[in-house]
Image: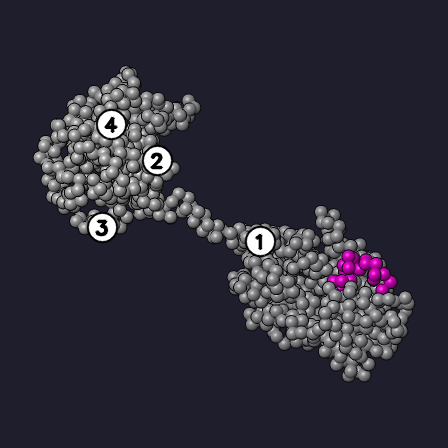
Amino acid sequence: MQVLLEVIRGLCDRPGFFYRSKTEEIVGDQPLPLLYLESEASPTAFLRALEHRLDEGRPAIPHAYVDVSSVTAEVAKNWPSGTRETPPLLPLLDVLSDRLGEVHVGSERLTRFDHYRLVDWLTSKRLPRKPGRDDRASVIELLRQWTGKTAQGGEEVNRAVDAFIPGLVTRLGLGLVAWVGSKVGFRWLAKRVPGLSRESKWFMRQNFALPNHSIEFLGFAERLTLGRRESENEEQIKLLLVHAFLEDLRISYRRRPRLLPRRAGWRRTAYIPVLLDGVSKDNGGWELLELINDVRNETGEVDPLLVIAASSVQPALSQRLGVTPVAPDETEEALATWREELPRKRQMLAPDARYLMIRLPFPSHDKKKWKGAPPFRAAPVRWLAKSRRLEAIIAAIVLVLLVPGFVTVQNHFQLNCSIVGSAISPGVQTRLMDVDGNVECLGYSDNGDQVFGSNERLRWTQQAVFAQNGEAERLHETNPARPLISLLYFSSLTHKDSNPDADHSRAEELEGMLLKQRQQNDRSSSGPLLRIVIANGGGMMKRAHDVLRDMITPLLDEDPSIIGVIGLDRSVKQTQEVITSLGSLGVPTIGTTLTEASLPDLSATYFQLIPGNARQADLVRRYAQHVGATKVTIHHPKLGQDDVYLTDLVGLLGQELARNQVKFQADEWTVSPQEVPSQCVEDHSSELVFFAGREEDFGEFLRAVGKDCYDKNRLPRIVADDAIIRFIAQKASRVQDSLAGMRVSYVSMAGLIVLAGKACVAGKPDPSARGGLPLDAFCAGYSKLAKEIQESPLPAEDRPVKPWPGEHMGVAYDAAGLFLDAVTRAYSRRASSTPHRGAIGAEFRELEFYGATGRTDFKKSRVGESRNFTILEVTDLHDYEQQPTCVFLTGDLYGPDTPRLPNGCPA
């Protein structure tokens, strides 16, 4: 008995996907025998005990037990009188399908037996007879009833058409479509039965009941119905029922439908033993076994059904087939012999090809013999095939792949960095880059799809510039004779922390270019149209060279209308690299606020409006001598290679003072300006203190200088470099109580604009400025722009409240004007297309430009060394309404005949 149980246990095990049998070259699933047990008793206690073992197994092996003697009663219970016209053709198979239909493998149903139940449905139905309707329409209606049948089986039907298309108008519309389709040749449209595609294809491919005698599935289905199948071979229909039953099991065990794995099939690690107890010739048991044998022989397909049938020896199926049953202990050898002979017997379609017959002893249920029985349990499911495992892996992979994307999208959103704009707009290219541990949005833009920075005033100005870009392009389309030229504004538009000083100074520069844009893009004008592309090099221009290399250089190659670059914030190492690279590309570049002496040596196409640090050192030295300072103390931070501007300025100023025998001292703070000692403990009123630093340190420097000061007349004269213009321009920086009463002077790069005063904001410059038409035009435009900004929805802290025009605005305004004058001169030479960038640089060297900030002449030098350089003074830094006054000026004014005071300021 132990050998028999081991054999049955082994037959329940499903081999692996790559398993290859020794006797047959079959990979994966193996053919199973019809295990037939002859016993003295019927039903036999052996199958009941085996069923009990199968029930106890964990994981459970899917199985079913049927007492064949009770099949008739069970069929009558399943199909009450009136439910169907005829009983099932194979009652035992019908009961078996019900039993296995309730079996679950894990949480999944074994199968619904769609193929088998469809055949059984058709064999139990007559075609509906309706006047004027052909049989084809009737079978379509019958099949549509099947597709709407309830999942539990039986006769409750929901018509699919009515279930999914309840509206009368909709049904009429679909009927019209079907009728029109049939008229134009799409006859299949009216014959469509949704939900039967897979079944109909299989029925027409298999061989039983001769499906090829029908042109299509509808005709084959019609032949299976009552009133039609009587003329068919009943044996063939029964073979079709068994074949469909086994096909449903094959589908549920299929591990690979085509190419991709099917995990439900991989979870089926055990075959399906069905225990048929008490089979005989009269109760349909023998017939079902014979049909399974014939189907397997004729199709040669492997299925997962392990039939274990038992019956009494009288009458004996073995005698009918001429087979001698073996003893249970000989089962293993008999199985090996069966496998060896199966190929030959299958080809001969032998009626005993699939049988393996065993003679059970009586009694067959001995508890002692079952004590050592092997455990009947399914092999564990491979980890990857388990439910939700693959989903978890896919979800994890998707998460890993998408999280960076989500983070990127979130970063883009938080940093106002466009993703869609970069993808769809040729005028936008952005990238998130790390700037000293801070992620910033860098790149360029010429339209509202990308606006840089977070400051509202800076963003508003960019939007206004982009609106003018659109206006320029529209005017160019209307009048192509007006050339469309572009300037690239390249500066630092983002930073790590809030810095309104830097943001507003950038906004001022853009406002100056916007003002020139509006004046130039006048419909009544015939001159060049101006478009501005805005580029961001990151905080302190730290990634400016990366932006130039990766994004701006390709843009310059693609867009010849870009004739030059304006801006370039801060004289730092990265800015030097940008100037060098732009020079190698032949791009004219105007630095708006740069003054470091070595910059012109880096590029032959670099021009600078503001005089260099040598002129600033000369200005401070002359002023110190003018006021009779007994000593000059230069306070500066620790000098390094990155901030080239300060290193250069401190060095040149020291040399200038020493050369002119002015007593001086350079004091360096290492951490912060708090290290600067108070200048009020002793009387330093005859001295001059020069702040050589950046605007972010200036407020702290002033507080350190004036610490514990009870007599401000003891303070030295305080002069700051041109980098603190942003501090002077910001109300929030100046209205601190600790700065009340502080007198401060500073170097101004466009002092004449400041001297135009409050009158310029109102629309006309102060008459004492004597700026002529260029200054008048600037003030007229600035008055309108300032009013527009004040009436905008900007927060109060972001609206310009400075009572005079900003220096950065005037310098950028004139820089754009220089390019426009150069283009106009180039076109006056009968140029037929946009002048080459090199030609624009050449035009600069011949220009004598009169702008709002004064006269600029590049004939002798690419740096505006002859331009005015001014020291302005505010007697009370806390009073923001107080306009700076000129205390010392060198260089050209607006014209050679402009009267001056002894200090060089306009008279």
Q: Give the crowd class for mark 1: few <14, some 14-19, many >=20 residues within 10 Å.
A: some
Q: Quadrant of the N terminus?
A: top left
439 inside magenta stretch: no
Task: Judge left or right: residue 763 versus residue 578.
Answer: right
Give the position of the C terminus as an image quadrant: bottom right
Give the Cα separation between the discs numbered 1 and 4. 69 Å
Residue 67 marker: 4
Local SS, label 4: strand
Going by the numbered disc 1, the residue's amino acid type is Asn
Which residues are drawn in magenta? Answer: 723-743
Q: Which residue is mark 3?
A: 20
Residue drawn at the location 19% of the way across and 28% of the way down = 42
Q: Position of residue 785 (x, y in %)?
A: 73, 53
- The residue lying at 53 percent from left, 64 percent from top is 550
Figure check: 441 above or below 577: above
| Labels 1, 3: front one | 3
- Residue 104 is labelled as 2
Q: CA distance from mark 1 to mark 3?
A: 55 Å
* Residue 130 visible somewhere in the drawing: no
Distance, label 2 to label 4, CA atoms, is: 21 Å
Badge 1 marks a residue whose secondary structure is: helix
